[in-house]
Image (cartoon, coloured by chain):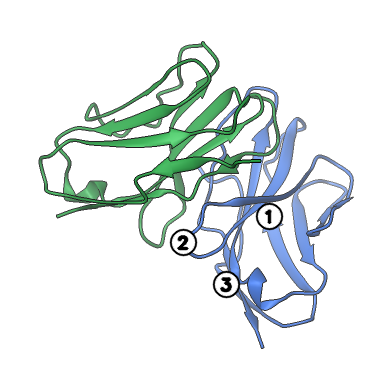
Chain colours: A green, B blue
């Protein structure tokens, strides 16, 4: 079946602009995660959605970052007034339920802020 | 805070077994050991997980010491396509916590 998809695959934006990144999880997966990966570094947790529960936003680095998810479907990550340090690959993952051992990752969106 | 310690890099000859170590000396009784890998320019991929017992699947074997303070991921016959960064993670499963990915081990499989 279809895996996790993300769009766009690449995004170049000017400093100060807002960007919106999209994640389509695997159908039926109730848990959805966003991570950030700077060049040459490990993954950094950003936010977690589980069904209709309040999201865990503990990893968001600043109030310029926000994310939404409608039910158990698509999620969007929005970065306002982008800064150069926001340049990274943004990865989305979904899992069947919150207790699931396996997270399925999308290919990521490479964001470059010039 | 990182809960695991891995060597930054390792080499392995193609066709030989790759043994990737991980230390997790502060692991709690309800924390699982997970291994993921990330091939260049792709998202991470689940490999295997375990709690106490050794585990094997079509990709790899996971050997966990009796005191659970360390583990080893074994790729029995490494191929060039196994070149990747391998992440060892400990996590409590039943609360849906996010995975904390450290820097991992960069495995280079050499021809």
Task: Check disc 2: other Cα within 10 Å, few if <14, some if 14-19, many if 20+.
Answer: few
Whichever of labels 2 and 1 marks the residue nearer the N terminus, that label is: 1
Q: Does residue B25 appear left or right of residue B107 in this picture?
A: right
Whichever of labels 3 and 2 marks the residue nearer the N terminus, that label is: 3
Q: Does residue B37 appear left or right of residue A66 in this picture?
A: right
Label 3 SS: strand
The answer to whether residue B85 is above or below residue B96 is below
| Residue drawn 40% across the image and 32% down it | A59
Q: Does residue B46 appear left or right of residue A61 in this picture?
A: right
Q: Marks 3/2: CA distance? A: 18 Å
Residue under pointer 1: B23
Label 3 with label 1: CB-CB less than 8 Å: no
| Residue drawn 70% across the image and 30% down it | A100
Label 1 SS: strand
Residue B24 in view in this figure: no
What is the number of the mark on residue B41?
Answer: 2
Task: Check disc 1: other Cα within 10 Å, few if <14, some if 14-19, many if 20+.
Answer: some
Q: Does residue A38 appear left or right of residue B7 in this picture?
A: left
Whichever of labels 3 and 1 marks the residue nearer the N terminus, that label is: 3
| Residue drawn 60% across the image and 41% down it | A2
Give the number of the mark in front: 3 or 2.
Answer: 2
Quadrant in which residue B62 is drawn: bottom right
Q: Position of residue B107 (x, y in %)?
A: 61, 71
């Amino acid at each position: 079946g279809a895996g996790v998809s993300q769009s766009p695959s690449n995004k170049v934006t000017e400093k100060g602009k807002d960007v919106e990144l999209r994640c389509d999880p695997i159908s039926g997966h109730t848990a959805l995660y966003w991570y950030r990966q700077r060049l040459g570094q490990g993954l950094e947790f950003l936010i977690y959605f589980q069904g209709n529960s309040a999201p865990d936003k503990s990893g968001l680095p600043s109030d310029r970052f926000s994310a939404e998810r409608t039910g158990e479907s698509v999620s969007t990550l929005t970065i306002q007034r982008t800064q150069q340090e926001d340049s990274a690959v943004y990865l989305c993952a979904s899992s069947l339920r919150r207790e699931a051992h396996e997270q399925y990752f999308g290919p990521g969106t490479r964001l470059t802020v010039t | 805070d990182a809960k695991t310690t891995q060597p930054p890099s390792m080499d392995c000859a193609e066709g030989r077994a790759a043994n990737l170590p991980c230390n997790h000396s502060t692991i709690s009784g309800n924390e699982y050991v997970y291994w993921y890998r990330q091939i260049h320019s792709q998202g991470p991929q689940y490999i295997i997980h375990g709690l106490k017992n050794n585990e094997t699947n079509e990709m790899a074997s996971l050997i966990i010491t009796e005191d659970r303070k360390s583990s080893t991921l074994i790729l029995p016959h490494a191929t060039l396509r196994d070149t990747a960064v391998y992440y060892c993670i400990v996590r409590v499963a039943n609360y849906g916590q996010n995975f904390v990915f450290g820097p991992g081990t960069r495995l280079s499989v050499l021809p």
